[in-house]
Structures are given as C-alpha cells and as structure tokens.
Amino acid sequence: MNETLRVVHAHGDRITVTEPTTGVDLFAYVYRREAAWEAPKPYLHPIRTLSGAVVTDYRPHDHRWHKGLQMTASHLSGQNLWGGNSYVHGEGYLALPERVGSMAHVGFDDIRADATGLVIAERLTWHPYDGALWAEEARRIEVRDVDPAAGTWALTWASAVTNRRAEPLVFGSPTTHGRELAGYTGLFWRGPRAFRDGRIRTADAEGPGIMGTQAPWLAYSGEHDGSDGCATLVFEHAPENDHAGERGAHPAHWFVRNDPFAAVAPSFAYYDDLVLEPGATLSRRYRVVVADGEWERDEITDYLARHPW
C-alpha cells in the first residue's frame, strides 16, 4: 500500500476509513448508542471489498441486533449482551428486557493512519441492564495489507476484557444452556442476505457441518446482489489464541451458518462456560481478510502464508 488511508471521524457517531486509490469506504466503525433492546455496542458496518461490494448486514428483519461485525456476549452471568430475546432452556427465546445489557464507548486512545495501515485503539465498559460496571475492555482494530491490485485487505480485531466485578464473570452461549448447534458468542459477523447458502470451508473440511468444530481459520464465500461477482472473507485466530486449548487456555469452536442466513463467530464458549475471575483479563485477537472473488483453499493458505501475523 503506497497511499495513506483516509480517515473521517464524525465525533460521537462513527469513524469512516477510505482506501484512496479506489475511493472505496472500507468500513465505518459506529460507536453511537442505539436501541436498548438490541444490546447497544460499537460495530463495523458497512464493510466493503475493494471493488465496493458490501459484505455485512445491518438490523436484518430476522435479528435486528445483528450489526455487521461486533463483539458480543450472548450469555454473561445471567445477562444478555447479544441483544433481542434471551434463550431460556425449556422455554425458548423470551422477551426479558431486564437481562439485556450493553457495551459502551468510553474514549479513543489512538486513531492513526500511515503508509502501512490504520490503528483504532478504544476503551469500552460492559454493563448489565441496571448499568453497573461489570468489565472494562481495551479494543484495538487495525487495517493492514491493503492491495487494490489484488482486491484484498485485512482487518485485525483485538479485545482484552477485564472483570471488574467482585465475583466471576461467566461467559456462555445458548448451547451451554441447552440448545444444540447454537454456541454463538464473542466476535460475530452477519453477512448480507445474498450470502445465504454461501460456501464454507476450513483447511480440511467444507460445508455447514463445520459448525462446532475447531480450526485455525474458516472462510466464507458468497455472491453479491446488485453487482457481479463473489467475495471471500477469511476469519483467522491469532497464534496466541490457543483456539484448541492445547496450551491450557479455554478452547474455541466455530459457530457458522449459511442457512437461513450467513453468520460466523469464533466462539470462546461454544460447549462449555468460560469463567473469568475478578481482576482477570480475557484476551483474544482475530484477523478478517476481505477479498474480491471466490477463493479456493490453496489461494487461502497461500495468502495466509505470505501475510504472517
């Protein structure tokens, strides 16, 4: 990348990042507070490929709280920082507004673009419905490896969440509470409606049967409405995530659907609760590669090898 990304900050609302060669707005990072029932939290939408195609959805009719790419917590010590109705085993999804919390923007420590990419460093707080302070988060979003000729760019998302309660924070999911194949929590992407029935693959598997499995990366390809062609998004664990729990960390499993909608989350509480003790910090880092075209497995592995962490 030879030119510096353009950054426009509408204070109190959003940060918009533009690639100058193509003139494409790569994404908007929106941090204004939205509807309480939707568990308000900052999010990225729209995210675009370098050809200008949108690869996220916002407030779809089926789940109004799905907003682009965002950090979530579907079950957190009895609260819902996911949004919408809350899952209760044996009763299904219920409207329980007293369980719906929020993640609030506190301030930016750094917003910086140069010839190598972009950094957005932010401080946030996590709250249950009553507004108490449950956690503080240090978030860092970076853009790197922008290549207009190849039609590729990459975003990294790092979150470090520190428990500020006097008791443990327990991260779970609908699956840890009794619903099969619904282990969603953590970083969550909702794809555009046209991406339904898209192609899902990892290094050694393909198809929606990947749900609930472990892999260092997962790719999702879909075809656009309104413009010709496809896009591929590659979601990857950073090496320190220890996604398989081989070094003693809590393991992660992929939540992924292509029916009835496109969605991906590297869930850190798919099958089992994750317990965060008072004062302890949960740190996770991910990369999302946004590429024009439908990539085959060898193209994905080649890209990741040529662009190490």
Image (cartoon, rainbow, N blue to C red):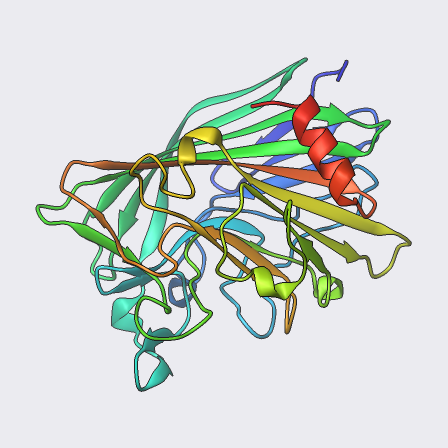
Q: Which residue: 50% across, 56% down?
A: 213
Q: Residue furthest bottom?
A: 91
Residue projecting furthest to the right: 228
From the viewer's side, name the closer residue of 262 and 166.
262
Name the residue rendered at 83%, 24% in the picture. 21
In the depicted view, which residue is nearer to us: 279 or 112?
Answer: 279
- List x then y, in percent, for residue 148: 82, 28
Q: Is 164 placed above or below 127 here?
A: above
Q: Is residue 183 left or right of residue 160?
A: right
- Tell which of 159 and 106 is nearer to you: 159
Looking at the picture, how far across and down is residue 308, in whole percent? Answer: 61, 22
Q: Does residue 49 show up?
A: no
- Residue 281 makes an appearance in the image: yes
User: Percent position (x, y) of residue 83?
Assistant: 41, 64
Residue 171 vs residue 254: left or right? left
- Quick one: quadrant of the C terminus? top right
Q: How many marks?
A: 0
Q: Residue at x 37, y 68 (%)?
A: 175
Quadrant containing the N terminus is top right
Residue 49 in the image, given as x and y percentages of width and height: 76, 41
- Residue at the location (79% across, 44% down)? 295
Task: Locate residue 266 relative to residue 273 in the image: left or right.
Answer: right
